[in-house]
Amino acid sequence: MKKLAVRGTVLATVDRGSGMPLLLVHGFPLDHTMWDTQIEALCDRYRVIAPDLRGFGQSDVTEGTVTMEQLADDLAGLLDALEVGEPVVLGGLSMGGYVAWAFWRKHAARLRGLVLCDTRAAADSPEAAAGRRETAERVLREGPAVLAESMLPKLLAPQTLQLRPEIADRLRRVILAGDRRGLAAAARGMAERPDATPQLPEIRCPTLILVGAQDVISTVAEMRGLAEKIPGARLVCIEGAGHMAPVERPAETSALIRAFLDQLTESETATGS
Ligand code: MLT
């Protein structure tokens, strides 16, 4: 992994391949390794950049509250540090999608496409935001095991939990290795995020929306609503997956992203853009 000084912190990132840049943004409380299969599968034709966000994985931690806007600015800074001048396709899962909304608000000119996986546009209700802040306090006191216990059953589809325990084990290891201060800071930041719903009709870049058929965090119905509001967005429902389609159905997710990128490349070549 590369380690780069960005906006007063150090971010660790995978940077593999060359070609159209694909920036993959992980969910909470995970790190870039959730994209391992997609990185391997796509770096033959595309430049795949998969960072650990501030406070996660091998990146440095900032205490307090880290907002989705700060994380989006980090990504823009990371692209500068990697000398990526051309617009990117941003793929974000769940919290990565919340960061994608902020990136669109602040850095739309740097976007040529969006891949939104298992995410939501709505803000937290006041109750949900209060619950998140309480969770942040508990994580600070008791450590990341709090999140492993409460989130794992919701991250994965029932059949993944039953038949493929190695996937839950892998995610558990990542969660337990997390830094409690980084996790708490991002949880507080998610509680503060604004409602992105009003911006959806203004999104003009090609958009692919992926959702696990058994996602209980960002449901198919909610993601269908989101897809209907983004002009031209395509929704694909992935059978046999919960909230973590890239990990539960890795080959299928990679193939869908590849087809989207290939189509984007072809249409850009055809129009000379
Ligand atoms: C995620 O996967 O990033 C989380 O489920 C996001 C959230 O807690 O809202």
Image: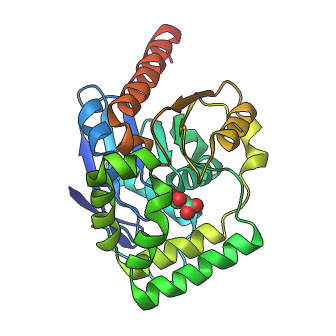
- Classify 9 as above or below 222: below
Residue, far left: 1
- Residue 243 location, x and y as percent? 50, 49
Residue, far bottom: 141
Q: Residue at x 60, y 83 (%)?
A: 134
The image quadrant that residue 132 belongs to is bottom right
The image quadrant that residue 225 belongs to is top right
Q: Residue at x 46, y 83 (%)?
A: 139
Q: How many marks?
A: 0
In the picture, measured across the screen, residue 39 lies left or right of residue 102, that is: left
- Residue 260 location, x and y as percent? 46, 23
Residue, far front: 162
Q: Residue at x 42, y 20 (%)?
A: 259
- Residue 245 location, x and y as percent? 44, 41
Residue, far top: 270
Q: Nearer the viewer, residue 140 or 1?
A: 140
Q: Residue at x 64, y 77 (%)?
A: 131
Residue 84 in sight here: no
In the picture, measured across the screen, residue 221 lies left or right of residue 64, that is: right
- Classify 147 as above or below 221: below
In the picture, measured across the screen, residue 232 lies left or right of residue 149, that is: right
Q: Nearer the viewer, residue 22 or 219?
A: 219
Q: Nearer the viewer, residue 88 or 234?
A: 234
Quadrant holding the N terminus: bottom left
Residue 13 in sight here: yes
- Residue 176 location, x and y as percent? 32, 73
Snapshot colouring: rainbow
The image quadrant that residue 191 belongs to is bottom right
